[in-house]
Image (tube, rainbow, N blue to C red):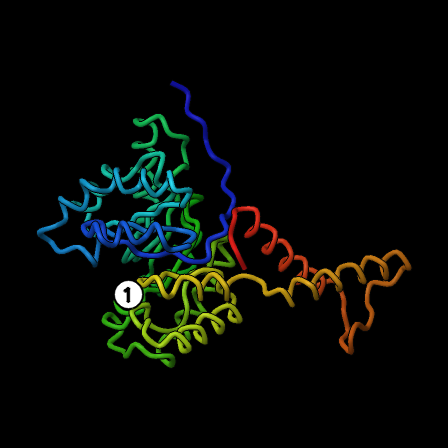
Amino acid sequence: MRHTTITQTLPIWRSIMFVPAVSERFVESAFKVPADVLQIDLEDSVGPAQKDEARARVAAIADRFAEAKRDVSVRVNRPWRLLLRDLEATVRKSVTAITLPKVANAAFVRSVAEVLTDLERERDLPIGHTRIITMVEDADGMANINEIAAAHSRVVGQIVGAEDLAVSMHMAVEDDSLYVPNVLNVVAARRGGIIPIGFIGSVADFKDQALFRARIRRARKLGFESAFCVHPSQVPIINEEFAPSTAEVEQGKELVERFELEEQAGRSAFTHKGRMVDLPVVDQARRVLARHAAIHARGGKP
């Protein structure tokens, strides 16, 4: 049987919300939340005695989420014996990606990709259908962060796991300790051509919405485009802050139009509203407009 291979492009994912596989209440409430990705969790939110139950529920939950026009990811477990069973239960048409925790090196990512290819062939899915989000969560992963981000064409995004990294590094979960790992993740993601996911802080801190908004706003300024979340109240904030504002879109259009006029007159640099403008500034404006258009094309709201 012939199998097609997908040519990968980056999706527009702002909010990626965890949904514990064993909680029907959380599954039902997820349909009411405008997250770009609903992430079925088989790892930290599922106790050892519930792993089999969670795994058995993945197919039905993923199919329902996909029918509701959501992208679906599944966070699997790290130990190989659990991971292989998770992958067997997860690879299907309705699952867009797996989120791979505790990634220590690129070789591990490539091994997982090989298993995904076997499962896709077996299930008559296009090769490359199942993307990978890598989670760097220990000192070994940080030492190999650039190689992990570029490990395989299936890798679509990368995040630093704050709590697990803090355990590995014997450090506190606070801005000072998390700043450098997160900025290094942005560098690695950009070098690898994938989505930088995250923000400086703990995903578990959701009660103070003003603080959370400030963290996401800062993350965008640092180059992040997406974030994990654990509570529905975080989703609208993430979606809004990781989308261009109305003012940014209007300014971008004005700047690009002015640049095109100046270019027709033979000028590649000019002053606009008291600021020197050249091609890199215009390219930034074009990126804002392209992201705005892409979000609207998938039915998202800024």
Q: Name the residue under label 1.
A: 138
Would you say 18 lies left or right of 218 here?
left
Q: Is mark 1 on a helix, strand or loop?
A: loop
Residue 165: x, y in percent? 28, 68
**Residue visible at 54% across and 61% down?**
243
Q: Is any atom of residue 77 visible in this view?
A: no
Residue 219: x, y in percent? 47, 70
In this view of the protein, which residue sits in the foreground, 146 or 293?
293
Local crowd size for mark 1, using a 10 Å CA cut-off: few (<14), some (14–19), many (≥20): many
Q: Would you identify the image quadrant in which residue 168 lies? A: bottom left
- On-image quarter of the N terminus: top left
Residue furthest to the right: 265
For the residue marked with disc 1, what is the amino acid? Answer: Asp
Residue furthest to the top: 1
**Residue visible at 32% across and 38% down?**
63
Residue furthest to the left: 49
Q: Is any atom of residue 33 visible in this view?
A: yes
Would you say 82 lies left or right of 209 here?
left
Residue 15: x, y in percent? 42, 58
Q: Would you identify the image quadrant in which residue 247 lies? A: bottom right
In this view of the protein, which residue sits in the foreground, 34 or 211?
34
Residue 179: x, y in percent? 41, 75
**Residue visible at 33% across and 47% down?**
98
- On-image quarter of the C terminus: bottom right
